[in-house]
Image (spheres, rainbow, N blue to C red):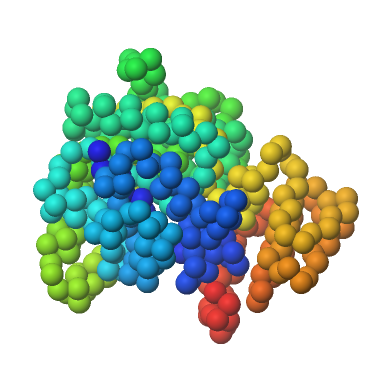
Amino acid sequence: MKIVIFAGGIGTRLWPLSRKNSPKQFYKIFDGKSTLELAFERLRNFGVENIYAQTIQKFSSIIAQQLPDLPCENIFIEPAMRNVGPAVALAAQKLKALDYSGPIAIIWADHIMKRPEEFTEKLEIAERLIEKNFNRFIFLAEQPRFANNNLGWIRIGSRIGETDCVDLFEFKGWKYKPDQVKCNQMFKSGEYFWNPGYFVSSIDFILSQYKKLAPRIFTATLAVARSKDSRKSADIYSNLEKESFDRCLIEKTDFKDAIVLKTDMGWSDPGTLYALKEALQKSFEENVEIGKVFNYSSKDSLIYNLENKKLVATVGLDGMIVVNTENAIIVTRKDKVKEITGLVEQLERFGYGEYL
């Protein structure tokens, strides 16, 4: 099986930790390692020759530096940032151009998990399922720990069988970032699981779905994968609309063409500053304090100080986010972290781009 780690995003919701020139997947947040490095280590047993990383040109040297064991030819370059829909198609086209048409796993560089052995076990099971039937998707669905409205959710249907003593379930659809009321209902129903975005399929099936459901993306990415002219490739790829993978394919996929494997791998996507706190905390609503921090009667807060010569002290905070970096500080309520993307857009608009 070939595994593609996607590492081309910027991560504006994690500003000021994540910047344009050093986005979140390369930031050494966890025990001196980046989430990219952790993702690679989790997958190493599949063989480094079977692991690929896809990114934009400006980040390729960072990947080569952080993953010295990854063959240089296994770093795929996206000519421009066009979201996940075109990116997955391009990776599949590049592997097809290398004469490969077997199982492929789609993985993200900016996630963490507390039980990685559960993750690799389910990936291996998904690989075997695809080897038996190339024409389907195998989705991993994570056991939800709370009603998180910052994530996409997978609806799971009836049990339809088992393999390797692991139950297989019907795929009944997606719900992307529901409002909090709907999210609470979904969580209580027990029918919905978090969608970590991991799936296994075959190259030929993925490309056949693009050809049928997103033909413009299929044609453009085929041309890019075959082209030797980088300028021409950039022109073709840049003309594609930015589209999510969900919208391109999954929302249009026939339910019978997918199977769901439940997971409980302690997964989280630290895509927002509060999600980062949730990933790092040991118990619900405890503080997470990093760097030179002194807390007095605060709770459920993230206080992250990157300056060794400066003390950050807090008094009576509740559900707050405080991040201090060398040239930027942010203070926000945990329920407002989704608005950081809008803040970053405004900072750019009003001439503060040097801080991004």
Q: Position of residue 288 (x, y in %)?
A: 72, 49
Residue pictured at 39% horizontal, 56% vertical = 67
Residue pictured at 19% horizontal, 73% vertical = 230
Tally of numbered discs: 0
Q: Position of residue 294 (x, y in %)?
A: 83, 58
Q: Is residue 334 left or right of residue 119?
A: right
**Which quadrant of the figure contains the C terminus?**
bottom right
Whether residue 46 is situated above or below residue 143 in the rendered picture:
below
Could you say which quadrant of the image residue 87 lies in?
A: bottom left
**Which quadrant of the figure contains the N terminus?**
top left
Could you tell me if residue 273 is visible in this image?
A: yes
Q: Position of residue 205 (x, y in %)?
A: 18, 39
Whether residue 251 is situated above or below residue 187 in the rendered picture:
below
Could you say which quadrant of the image residue 168 lies in?
A: top left
Residue pictured at 88% horizontal, 54% vertical = 296
Q: Is residue 313 left or right of residue 22?
A: right
Could you tell me if residue 175 is visible in this image?
A: no
Can you name the residue that lies furthest to the front here? Answer: 69
Q: Position of residue 143 (x, y in %)?
A: 52, 30
Residue pictured at 44% horizontal, 27% vertical = 262
Whether residue 122 is situated above or below residue 280 in the rendered picture:
above
Towards the viewer: 243 or 283: 283
